[in-house]
Amino acid sequence: MVLCFFHNRNRQAVRNGADMENVSEALLKELIESVLEGRNILHKKSAEINPVSLEKKGEPSDVQNMEMPADGENRQEIDCKKDDAPAITDYDVREQYLVENPVNREAFADLKKNAPCRLGIGKAGARCKTRPMLQFQAAHSAAQDAVFSDVDPKVLEELGLFQVQTQCRNKDVFLTRPDLGRRLNEEGLRLIKERCRQNPQVQIYVSDGLSSAAVNANVREVLPSMEQGLQGYGIETGTPFFVRYGRVGAMDQIAEITGARVTCVLIGERPGLLTAESMSAYIVYNGYVGIPESRRTVVSNIHSRGTVPAEAGAHIAEVIKKILETEKSGTQLAL
């Protein structure tokens, strides 16, 4: 409307031949007055629609009451590093029960103590609650890290383990070609023949398997405990070593090379969503390439929340003693 007014008056001034400078000044004055008048009209209409004024008479507004810090004045800063909340992974699933208004909390809690699982974690509508969902995602990330990471070289150095490798060139080949993880490469075969004692009663070795994290977390306690237990039983052991990118089946070839009566591998198990640090001990009597899987004895679930590593080592030594006495392993062995 204002633009039309300006346009019409301008055309009229030109038509009359008036001085453009004087006309422009007069039009500008009228334009400003018109804009101001329109603003007042809009303000009155707004007040009629919303009778509650932002600034009541006699009462200062909230904006006026706000005390703004002066330039250069120290402002209070929040330290985001200090957080008293527990870590998302710092919990025991056996003690976690988030169901609201349960019928029998005590019975369910007793069940979870015997079988750690993600039950009784509650719901928010049709979905999981936030904390259990974050714990699930954290456990999944830890499982991925356990598979794709490598065993810490310092652990192998502390235990005095030399390293050999299977026919897998890298981790990708190891995951996609399990058959290559059951056979050692030529260099590995040569090192074992040169550095290992031949024909021992028991040959123990360590392998990363599907969880390097399990080896890092447990082998420092399990291996010495095993060796101490076997020594107490008067059982001689061969030279321990480490197999990189190894599957359980690699123990058959190692049994043939070393000539051991009993072969035992401490290997990282496929990580789950309760723990990524579970290790197992697979034991076979008179192993050979092609031996049936049923001939293997396994002690599994070795981790801090399962079979405690130090106790697991002593138990494995006892199982090996039983295997040597009965000359049987796997389903043929009656413990």
Image: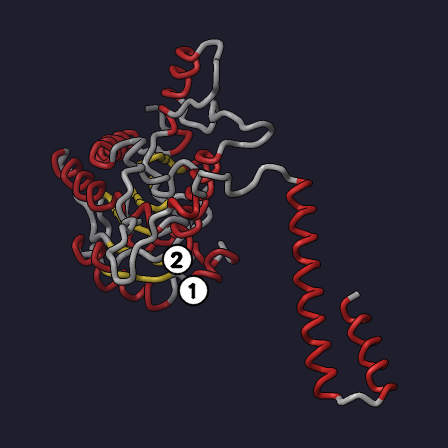
**Is 241 drawn above or below residue 286 in the view shown?**
below
Closer to the camera in the image, 200 or 233 = 233
Question: Which quadrant is home to the N terminus?
Answer: bottom right
Numbered circle sitting on residue 245? 2
Q: Which residue is mark 1?
A: 170
Amino acid identity at mark 2: Tyr
Q: Indicate left or right for 260 with 54 as reference.
A: left
Closer to the camera in the image, 39 or 258 = 39
- Residue occupying the point 56% across, 41% down: 53
Residue 133 % position (x, y): 48, 37
N-term mark: 1 or 2: 1
**Is 165 drawn above or below residue 57 in the view shown?**
below
Q: Is residue 283 visible?
A: no
Figure quadrant of residue 18: bottom right
Question: Which quadrant is home to the C terminus?
Answer: top left
Residue 167 % position (x, y): 42, 63
Amino acid identity at mark 1: Asn
Q: Indicate left or right for 175 with 95 as reference.
A: right
Label 1 crowd (10 A; few <14 / some 14-19 / many >=20): few
> Alpha carbon of mark 1 to alpha carbon of mark 2: how far?
8 Å
Closer to the camera in the image, 170 or 202 = 170
**Is 30 drawn above or below residue 44 in the view shown?**
below
- Residue occupying the point 41% across, 36% down: 274
Q: Mark 2 falls on what kind of element? A: loop
Q: Is residue 316 visible?
A: yes
Figure quadrant of residue 62: top left
Closer to the camera in the image, 109 or 307 = 109
Q: Mark 1 falls on what kind of element? A: loop
Label 2 crowd (10 A; few <14 / some 14-19 / many >=20): many
Residue 6 % position (x, y): 78, 74
Tags 1 and 2 touching, CB below 8 Å: yes
Figure quadrant of residue 69: bottom left
